[in-house]
Amino acid sequence: MSPGRRSHPFKRPVPSAGSRHQRIQSRRGNQRGQERVITGNRQASWAFADAYAAEDDALRWARDRAREAGLRSVSPSTGAALRLLAATVDAKAVAEIGTGTGVSGIHLLYGMRPDGVLTTVDPEPEHQQFARQAFRACGFASNRARFIPGRALDVLPRLADAGYDLVFCDGDRLEFLDYLAESLRLLRPGGLVVFEGVFANGRTVDSGPQPTEVIRIRELLRAVRESQELVPSLLPVGDGLLCAVKR
Ligand SMILES: C[S@@+](CC[C@H](N)C(=O)[O-])C[C@H]1O[C@@H](n2cnc3c(N)ncnc32)[C@H](O)[C@@H]1O
């Protein structure tokens, strides 16, 4: 065979149906298809993780109130991660920024010690009222939660230094870096700071122009990773849960 006519496995005419060559060609041709399958599997895995974290009626009720109010609430798998983290540090005192209608608060309370107290901050009293009802429906005694109405940056400076085992940040994303500074003061050594929603629905890794909120999240991710005081991990649950232990 002349060099010009040398055949290349992927340039040969398509052999008869079902041959090895056809399978190779179709495999290459279907790489995009495979990506679609993998993406589909990943979405199914995400849905499986959410379904695995079974939620009770009170949680579903709080979730419905959030939806009606146009609020995001943590996903079921994020809620399960919050429970796990609260239980891991045997949390007696947790500070939450952004009560919402109480979905994340319920998960945190389930993970905390039975005598643990959740201090939760939100400027919207009606959100906190829903959360109060939801906590009651779960059977948590009223002294397990301290509701503080107000903006985080007005309230947090009044909370005790090194008085908290975990700080959960789900308020105003523009303020995330300020929450980090406050959290480092509020946490005891070995305590955890946790930020919800750092994927920003995929915008954090999108190379296109992004709003200030996303720029702030990127700054936060960098600051947490570079901090000598923190041991971080970005958990790909829900919309991205950035966690870090204070040394
Ligand atoms: C995404 S929702 C929180 C959802 C809640 N963590 C949950 O999973 O059920 C954000 C909440 O942060 C509150 N918020 C907004 N700005 C805030 C601020 N500066 N300080 C504290 N909370 C704030 C909003 O009123 C809203 O209830």
Image: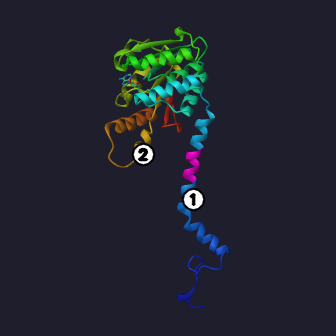
The residue located at (48%, 19%) in the rendering is 131
Examine the rendering and report whether any part of residue 246 can be seen.
no
User: Does residue 181 show up magenta in the picture?
Assistant: no
Please determine whether, in this image, residue 147 is positioned above or below residue 196.
above
Q: Earlier in the sequence, mark 2 or mark 1?
A: 1
Which mark identifies residue 205?
2
Residue type indicated by callout 2: Val
Residue 92 in percent (x, y) is at: 56, 14
Q: Nearer the viewer, residue 182 or 28?
A: 28
Please determine whether, in this image, residue 104 is positioned above or below residue 197.
above
2 and 1 marks in contact (CB < 8 Å): no
Q: Is residue 57 left or right of residue 164?
A: right
Q: Nearer the viewer, mark 2 or mark 1?
A: 1
Examine the rendering and report whether any part of residue 49 can be seen.
yes
What separation in Å lies between label 2 and label 1 (alpha carbons)? 22 Å
Which mark identifies residue 34?
1
Q: Quadrant of ligand 1?
A: top left
Picture quadrant of residue 49: top right
Which mark identifies residue 138?
none
Q: Nearer the viewer, residue 11 or 244?
A: 11
The residue located at (59%, 11%) in the rendering is 115
The residue stretch that appears in magenta:
38-44
Q: Is residue 160 left or right of residue 114?
A: left
Question: Dot 1 surroundings within 10 Å: few (below 14), some, or many (20 or more)?
Answer: few
Residue 227 in percent (x, y) is at: 44, 31
